[in-house]
Image: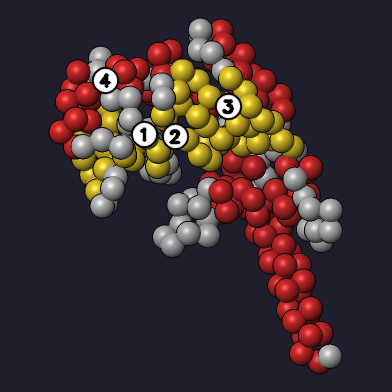
Amino acid sequence: MSTIAEFRVPAAETVLSATFEALPTVRFELEASVSKTLPSLWVSGVEREAIEDAFASDSSVEAFELVARSEERLLYDIDSSAAQSFYDKLLSSGGSLLEGHGCDGWWQYKMRFRSREALVETHERLENNEITVDLSRVTDISRMRAGNSRLTPEQHEALTAAFERGYFQIPRQISMEELAAELGISHQALSERLRRAYGTLVDAEVQPANERTNS
């Protein structure tokens, strides 16, 4: 059964340590993409000139490009062999990155692993490469079900993964085939789990509404 882990690692042992030191108020938020090996970085808390000066002076950054901006944030693509090496270690046991952000000299992550053993492998790999892992929470998805939920553990796992990986977003951030591969099941099995889960949730919502209407 899948496991969710929340942990942090120090920038000093991974990437962008000099940027954090130069800009104490900077905050990064990862934006993952199925078409890229490295996530893009949303930057907030600093001005464009300051962050670009920091990137240019940071030895862990080979190149950077501003690709989008909003009123309060800037989105950058970063070329970094140090970051690529770190993410290779982080993801090589099949874990999926659900959330990630950086502030105060730390990178904080939320990941889903296919099993507790895959999490242990990842933890040991990072520690063996002298990357400190500060683990704050580990949760088996099967134990995350509400006590009165009518979903099976497998249906709950499939819905949770689909939601967290952007399957329901417009446009979709991940295909059903890719999501099924992450869960270690076939495309057909995932489709059936999601369809049955939809039916259960719709029934749970519509039936009480009809009962209220008829009462």
Mark 4 to mark 1 CA distance (whole Å): 12 Å
What mark, if any, has residue 27 been given in the picture?
A: 1
Q: Is residue 157 left or right of residue 89?
A: right
Which SS class for mark 4? helix
Q: Residue at x 72, y 52 (%)?
A: 156
Q: Is residue 208 left or right of residue 159?
A: right
Crowd tier of the residue under label 2, counting other residues whose Cα lies within 10 Å: few below 14, some 14–19, many 20 or above:
some
Q: Nearer the viewer, residue 188 or 82?
A: 82
Judging by the rendered image, the residue that carries numbered circle 4 is 22
Judging by the rendered image, the residue that carries numbered circle 3 is 7
Judging by the rendered image, the residue that carries numbered circle 2 is 101
Which SS class for mark 2? strand
Crowd tier of the residue under label 4, counting other residues whose Cα lies within 10 Å: few below 14, some 14–19, many 20 or above:
some
Q: Are marks 4 and 1 in contact (CB under 8 Å)?
A: no
Crowd tier of the residue under label 3, counting other residues whose Cα lies within 10 Å: few below 14, some 14–19, many 20 or above:
some
The percent coordinates of residue 131 (x first, y second) are 50, 12
Q: Nearer the viewer, mark 3 or mark 4?
A: 4
Asked if residue 58 is positioned above or below residue 141 in the image, the reply reads above
**Type of amino acid at the residue the image marks with label 3:** Phe
